[in-house]
Amino acid sequence: MENKLKQFSFLDILVIIIGILALTTLIMLLLFKPIIENRYYRLGEELISKNNINQALKEINYALKLNYESSKLHEILGRIYIYKKDYLLSIKELEKAIEIDNNNYYAYLYLGISYYQQGKYNESINQLEKAISLDIENKNNSQAFYYIAKSYYNQGFTDLSILKLEDAIKIDEKNSEAFFELGKIYFEKQNIEKSIEYLNKSLLIKNTPDTNYYLGLCYENLGQLDNSIYYLKEAIRLNFSDNNIYYILGNIYFKKSLYQEAIIEYEKFVKNNPNDAISRYKLGNLYFNIGNYKYALEHYNKAISIDSTYKEILKYNIKEASNIIKVKNNIKKFQKLLEDFYLKNNHYPENIDKIYKNEDYLNYCKKMFNPYKNSNYFYDLFVDYNNYLENKNKFIFSGYIVYEPINYKNKFYQAYKLYAIDGNNNFIKYNSKDLIISNNSIVDEYEKK
């Protein structure tokens, strides 16, 4: 025996030991493969749930080096690639999972979802139906029916889509996505009451920006504008991704005659859609209506540069805004002229003729105001000059004062013609009752003429 042992060299013994260790390792791997598979599968799901996709990818790739023939590991790797939106690799891994185990329910389910994401709807339906056929008790098929419904919807088969969504809800009453899709479909069918019913059920399960957005549209459709604003703002708070929501909000505020609020929302829309002609047109009109003619012209001109058909539509507003801006640009200069004339004449009524007869002053007045005398933005006001001086702090005048006689029943009365603006540089109209006038009856009768 001793002689036989002597026949083995140290190298031979080392080889035998290594062989024994390798065999032991192989046996251990075979025994522990299911344990390795389940451990890393659960780890992968946990990391996916925490949205730690890159770490999940790293762990599953390592596990596959230990057990490459695991259908479950290939399946979860396919799911990881779906989260990474790499659908080609997702399909490759899921097909490998099915090749190893053609009864892997989740491999068929996620393969169907991968094809859906690629827009291959018929192939998606085929794989999802295979998954459904493997779930005899129909406990896990809500998601499969949901994606079959989405595939039908995207091909224009809305009635089939509704049936499959209802199947999804029968299996899982907490499937908020299925309730949402039903709400969206019924909104498109203009069945608003039913749309609100399903959207509210979806919202009770999960508060999403899309659900709030469609509820906002539903209430706008019903004319319940305050409810619409509430849900649309909630969608924005939840980071709704479609910039059109600001345009819709602008329209709603406009319907409510809340023009400043409408402007704010339209401006948000235009910021990301600078070449949208109709929103520029609407913004121009809003600014025009509130008297901000500079911004009105800016948006009008932009609308015309985008779509020349607006040139004819807007020609009157552009002319009016341009005229008003021209006058307003001269207001400060004109106010200074008045101040200078008043100071030089010590504000005495008997010296009014000096103002009236000052050719520079009169020419300036005529040049500036005559072209616009018939515009809606200028009004003739008749006021007794003495009373004006006594109560001048009540009025802000940047127009011109002209002495002229009024012939009433063959008698001549003194009056002064004024063009006035308020403290915000907006042209205003005073009725005779709003002014302190020495002879109201004469003025009233004169205005009737």
Image (spheres, rainbow, N blue to C red):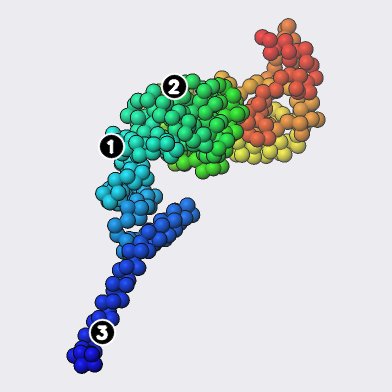
The residue under the point 75% across, 13% down is 442
| Between marks 3 and 2 in the image, the one whose residue lies nearer the viewer | 3
Q: Is residue 417 visible?
A: no
In-image side of 139 versus 72 (left or right): right
In-image side of 422 versus 103 (left or right): right
Q: Measuring from the top left, give residue 64's x and y in whole percent.
A: 32, 61
Q: Amino acid at mark 1?
A: Glu
As drawn, the label of residue 189 is 2
Badges 1 and 2: C-beta atoms under 8 Å apart? no
Q: Secondary structure at mark 2?
A: loop
Q: Eyeballing the image, is 194 above or below 7?
A: above
Q: Measuring from the top left, give residue 157's x and y in whole percent.
A: 35, 25
The tally of labels here is 3
Disc 3/disc 2 C-alpha distance (Å):
79 Å
Residue 197 occupies quadrant: top right
Dot 1 crowding, Cα within 10 Å, few <14, some 14–19, many 20+: some
If you read the primary sequence from the N terminus, does the residue marked by circle 1 or circle 2 appear first? 1
